Image: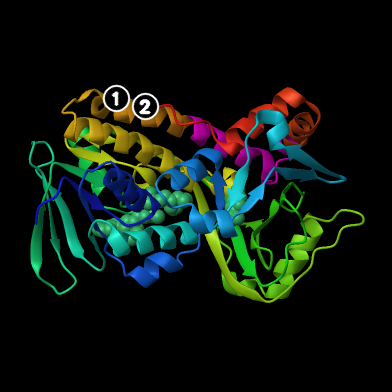
Amino acid sequence: MRTQVGIIGAGPAGLLLSRMLAVQGIESVVLENRSRDYVEARIRAGILEQHTVDTLREVGMGARLDREGLEHDGIYLQYPGTRHKLDFPELCGRNVWIYGQSEVVKDLIAAQLDDGPPLLFEVSDVQPRDVDTDSPSIAFTDADGVAQVLECDVVAGTDGFHGVSRPIVTAATDGQLWERTYPFAWLGILADVAPSTDDLIYAWHPDGFAMHSMRSPSVSRLYIQVDPTEKIEDWSDDRIWEALATRMALPGWELQTGPVTEKSILPMRSFVSSPMRHGRLFLAGDAAHIVPPTGAKGLNLAVADVTLLARALVRLLAEKETDLADAYSDKALARVWRCTHFSWWMTSMLHTHGDDFDAQLQLSQLQRVCTSEAAARELAEMYTGLPVAL
Ligand code: APR
Ligand code: PHB
């Protein structure tokens, strides 16, 4: 088998990269070790930044998003006694959309299988080879158990945090890794109940953070901060609803409850790996970095990476110029660190961890964002996403 770009991983990063390359006449093949059902069923965050929506529309992926996505013009920040709306268009002229990552992935897979480049599920033993030469390849075993080699000009490592690509880059470049694990986790539920709010609520409470998000006019997504050692079995639906109602309580407002259809505990970490390239192997998305979910940056950062990478690969493979490929890692990492800071800042401002001094600092910061236009604008600009500077 031969193609121009061999892509490892069919998450949002790999699928969107393949689509962007196809639109610009560059061939690719996507190799995914899980099944289609598994990849489509993974429940993840659901906020799309303005540039993410623009990008999906540009590559022909906007139809269902425009029909079913919920455009939101702000969020509520809450602390005891106060629920304050940040109006994004007023503050920075941009919006966000609610559209689940699993829906983005379903749309990309459907388009790819319809008339896009090859997408192979349930492959195994995926191994990039010779990435420090001009003719790299990817060895793998296909779904029928047959050993294959995909020869290519470039390998894209979009295989997520546990993939095979990052360790190759780190080892070959003597690369650096930075990591922060947080002393809390999120317990998330999906519930068949209409959202009790028009916009997302991010609530600080002495018992811990709580958040109200949604997936549709009839499905709510809610989270509470818990200790990372908590077991999901110890959290009955009633106990979760009670904690949510306590932490988001506001006079005159009531949280509606309904059947819980999914619940899980998610660890929170920040992680950045540099560089994002070795030779002809380029990393993008969770393969290179992880953010905690508080700012909803994970998917959007993956989209920003592949926007830069697609441009660099078109330049390299069609125009035979190496400048953008050479600049890719530094350019992508600048945005990664900005979003890493924002996600860390939102996380640090909203989660309690038993330190009274820190709690006072958090409340002071929340009051500042809710009363200063300059402070609110900074949050709004980062939350709605900076434009991708190509
Ligand atoms: N071979 C083939 N595929 C692999 C391998 C491998 N060795 N290892 C992992 N994969 C696949 C995974 O099964 C997954 O489908 O790579 C894909 C990586 O997808 P994601 O983890 O979704 O990562 P990415 O595409 O970068 O998307 C980032 O995902 O984790 C969220 O918050 C994050 O929203 C962000 C988004
Ligand atoms: C979600 O809807 O899952 C969601 C929304 C906003 C966040 C994190 C998760 O910051």
Q: Which residue is mark 2?
A: 331
Q: Quadrant of residue 77?
A: top right
Element assignment for label 1? helix
Q: Who is closer to the viewer here, 6 or 24? A: 24
* Picture layout, residue 102 above or below residue 208: below
User: Residue 320: x, y in percent?
Assistant: 15, 28
Quadrant location of ligand 1?
bottom left
| Viewer can see residue 3 | yes
Numbered range of the magenta stretch: 338-359
Up/down of 133 relative to 127, above or below: above
The residue carrying pointer 2 sits among few (fewer than 14), some (14 to 19) or many (20 or more) residues within 10 Å by Cα, namely some
The reply to whether callout 2 and callout 1 are in contact (CB within 8 Å) is: yes
* Residue at disc 2, secondary structure: helix
Query: Please, which colouring scheme is shown?
Result: rainbow
Amino acid residing under circle 2: Lys
Instruction: Specify the principal SS of the magenta part.
Output: helix
- As measured in the structure, the alpha-carbon distance from the residue carrying label 2 to the one carrying label 1 is 6 Å
Query: Is 110 placed above or below 52 here?
Result: below
Q: Is residue 209 magenta?
A: no
* Whole-percent x, y for residue 357 in the image: 74, 35
Horizontal relation, residue 273 to residue 342: left or right: left
Label at residue 327: 1
